[in-house]
Structure formats: structure tokens, C-alpha cells
Amino acid sequence: MSRNTVYLNGEWLPLAEARVSVLDRGFMLGDGVYELIPVYQRRAFRLDAHLARLQHSLDGIRLANPLSNAQWREVIGQVVAAHEADDQSVYLQVTRGAAPRDHAFPADTPPTVLVMSSPMSRPEPAQFEHGVRAVSTDDIRWRRCDLKTLNLLPNVLAKQQAVDAGCVECIMFRDGVLSEGAVSNIFAVKNGVILAPVKDQRVLPGITYDLVLELAQAHGLAYEVRDIREAEVRDADELWLTSSSREVQAIVELDGRPVGSGKPGPLYRRLHALYQDFKARLS
Ligand SMILES: Cc1ncc(COP(=O)(O)O)c(C=O)c1O
């Protein structure tokens, strides 16, 4: 198999040759779901959790899972093996297939299944060391943010708001309560306690979010899972963002004001070290 081979509906193709119909419901209606899985040293990180979340997203949009977990593992393994980089980001997407445009589900239409990979783009080391800046906005998304669907326009606009301000993330509040970032989950720290938003339909159930709480639990760090009011976020000692591609990063400035001391805090440093240690032990 050649480099940069993608899996599309049972076929293996070079990326440049992979094509889907303009009638694909992913393209026309955003009718599909996706996952992004980090691969370290050619090993997919927390694959079981990603496949479980994929199933949750598919169930949420009433689309049958086209592959068994064993088949997903096989396909992802082959995509990773075909790629030249050791550290990669595997992207997979399932849509409700190509059919004449109509909102209602089409009958007898096979789903479109894509798996591809790209070299992992790691954040700058300076970002782990010195932290990153964020802005904030109102969370204008729908009420099933727990599903990882292709409907990312509010996230796209929020992320661009961050980029326009020279920041890496945009934190969203719904009815005065922290939900998450445009592309990450958000944690706060106050008086030595890690505060995590409730993992319900207001946020994506982050794989990294779970790992952060697992590490906190395993190492006796105090944490609370509860609604976090906007005022608490603005008054936090530390803020972190977490995602598969950014791992854990300290947010040191929000809307132009310093978070806590304006430097990555002690609990961030602890969690970052625990996270790196966890990754190193797996590979
Ligand atoms: C909106 C949103 N929330 C949270 C996350 C973090 O999820 P994970 O840790 O599984 O990457 C992402 C990741 O892309 C995201 O897009």
C-alpha cells in the first residue's frame, strides 16, 4: 500500500484520488459524525474510548454503525501502517450516504465511511511551558453537543474569533455557565480544587477530559464535577484546555485579562507531567 492511503467505502485509495458524491448527506446536510484519534508511535491512543464515543454519536443520529469494533481496529491499523509518520492523527467520518437531497432519511442508502490519517501536528513546546491565550463567546450551539457531528459551524466561528484575536481557543458560556471550548474541554482550578464541567449534553465527552479526571483520581488530586459559573471562570486560579491534539494546556489569559498569576499554575504543571508520563508508559 502506498503512503497516505485512505479507506473509503471498502476501497483503499491515495488521498488525492478519494472522491464522494456531491449528493453525499455529509456535504449537503452535515448528516454525519466523526472522530479524531491521536496515534503515538503508531499506536492509536485510547482507541476503545474513541470507538465507544463513535457508537454514541451514531446512536444519537440514528445511523447504524457500518463496521464492528474489530473491523474499525483493522482499518485504522492499516491506515496507520500505510502512513510514514510515527505520530499521526487519524480522522474517521461516517455519513448517511449519497441520495437525492431530502431532509428525511433515505431508504436503502449505504453510509459513506472514510478513514484517513495525517502527521500529528504537535503544539509548540512553548505553549506547554508558558500557556496559551483565549477569548470567550456565547454558546449558540444546539442541545446535543455530546454528539460529535459534522455540524461544526458555531465551533468554526468561535475558533475564528480566537484566531482573529491572536488566541488559540474560544471558551463558550451557555446561560452564564461554562460549557467548553470551540475545540476542547475546559477545566478551572480554585483553591487547589480542579473544577470540571458536568459531562452531559452541553459538552462533547472528551477522551482527554476523562483521562485528566482519571489521573486526578489516581494521584489523589481534589476535583469536583459540577456547573461552573462564568464569574468562577473569570476568578479562577487556573484554567486549562484539554483535547486529543492539544493534550492539557494552561490558559493564562482570558479576554485580555490574566488568569490567576498569569502563568501556568502548579496543578497544571502536575497534570501535564502526569499526562506525559502516562503517554510515555504506553509506548
Ligand atoms: C468541541 C470539543 N470539545 C472537546 C473536545 C476534546 O475532545 P477530545 O479530548 O476527545 O479530543 C473537542 C476535540 O476536538 C472538541 O471539538
Image (tube, rainbow, N blue to C red):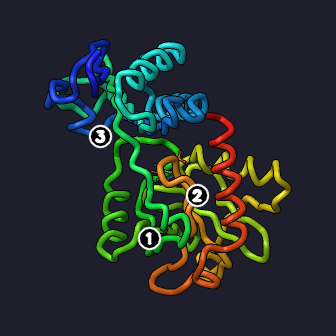
- Kind of residue at badge 1: Asp
Please tell me how crowded label 2 is: few (under 14), some (14-19), or many (20+) other residues with Cα within 10 Å. Answer: many
> How much space separates mark 2 and mark 3, taking CA atoms?
29 Å
Q: Position of residue 151 (x, y in %)?
A: 34, 46
Please tell me how crowded label 3 is: few (under 14), some (14-19), or many (20+) other residues with Cα within 10 Å. Answer: some
Q: Quick one: 154 or 129, which is closer to the camera? A: 129
Total labels: the figure holds 3
Q: Quick one: 208 or 264, which is closer to the camera? A: 264
**Which quadrant would residue 141 be assigned to in this image?**
bottom left
160 above or below 66? Answer: below
Q: Earlier in the sequence, mark 2 or mark 1?
A: 1
Q: Position of residue 113 (x, y in %)?
A: 33, 23
> How much space separates mark 2 and mark 1, taking CA atoms?
23 Å
Q: Residue at x 79, y 72 (%)?
A: 192
Q: Position of residue 268 (x, y in %)?
A: 66, 66
116 vs 233, left or right, is: left
Q: Residue at x 53, y 71 (%)?
A: 131
Q: Earlier in the sequence, mark 3 or mark 1?
A: 3
Q: Secondary structure at mark 1?
A: strand
**Which quadrant would residue 242 be assigned to in this image?**
bottom right
Q: Residue at x 63, y 64 (%)?
A: 187
Instruction: Specify whether residue 107 is in view.
Output: no
Q: Nearer the viewer, mark 2 or mark 3?
A: 2
**Residue matched to label 1:** 138
Rendered image: mark on residue 248 = 2
Q: Position of residue 146 (x, y in %)?
A: 53, 46
Q: Residue at x 62, y 51 (%)?
A: 209
Q: Earlier in the sequence, mark 2 or mark 3?
A: 3
Q: Secondary structure at mark 3?
A: loop
Figure quadrant of the C terminus: top right
